[in-house]
Image: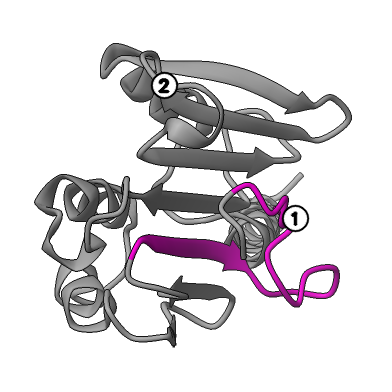
Amino acid sequence: MGKKQIYFLSIILVLMMFFITSCDNDYDKKNYITGVDFEETIYKLKKEGYRIDNLKSDNILKSCQPNNSYGNTFTDRIQLYSDEFGKTSAIRIESTTDGNNISTNEDAQQHYFWIGSLLSYPKNIKKWITDNFNKDKSSIMLDKYTKMIIYAPNKYTRRMDVFKINDTNKESPIKDDELLGY
């Protein structure tokens, strides 16, 4: 084989590697939330005193609640959804208070800020959460495929969904379970 042929084959190989990497990256951007490692997030929640419950087996849905709360008495719940190990397709955080106005509950807001801090997008997510925490419903596209919605159905509860919009998801794949009454 001559030098020209080796050079030509090298260029083809580099282009093929670039194309394959680009396709994988596009697939991940379209299907998984950037910067949120599923297992690492579960580990951090366990370390913070959350109990982790498996809710689904074919795809992975984990419900995370503080260890000292059960049933309707909990103050917050974080759910993570995935269909591939280590990657996160959707996040839901819900908070409720025991009759106090949640808009003045800094502990509840801190959980929303923490989830927001996990997201790797060029928007100021903490400011957006602060500005929209008390609106009935607000949404923002973090990129072409990632949507974040915050709901304030009453003065006692809040919910935030972060999920991918693509060919299979037009809304969060985490289904409503009416645990918080909305």
Q: Which residue, given by chain and number where applicable, does mark 1 sit on?
A: 175
Residue 88 coordinates in the image, percent (x, y): 57, 44
Label 2 packing within 10 angstroms: few (<14), some (14-19), many (20+): some
Tell me the residue at 17%/74% (across/down): 130
Residue type of the residue flagged with mark 1: Lys
Tell me how the rendering is colored: one colour
Please tell me whether residue 108 is drawn above or below residue 150 in the rendered image.
Answer: above
Q: Relative to the observer, which residue lies in front, 4 or 56?
A: 56
Q: Earlier in the sequence, mark 2 or mark 1?
A: 2
Report whether 14 appears left or right of 158.
Answer: right
Residue 57 coordinates in the image, percent (x, y): 84, 24
- Location of the N terminus (image quadrant): top right
Secondary structure mostly seen in the magenta stretch: loop
SS for callout 1: loop
Report whether 145 appears left or right of 8.
Answer: left
- Location of the C terminus (image quadrant): bottom right
Please tell me whether residue 44 is drawn above or below residue 81 in the rendered image.
Answer: above
Q: Which stretch did the figure color magenta?
A: 156-179
Question: Alpha-carbon distance for marks 2 and 1?
Answer: 22 Å
Tell me the residue at 65%/67% (across/down): 30
Q: Which residue, given by chain and number where applicable, does mark 2 sit on?
A: 69
Residue type of the residue flagged with mark 2: Ser
Q: Relative to the observer, which residue lies in front, 143 or 163?
A: 163
Extreme residue toward the front, this view: 99
- Does 47 lie within the magenta span? no
Residue 54 coordinates in the image, percent (x, y): 69, 21
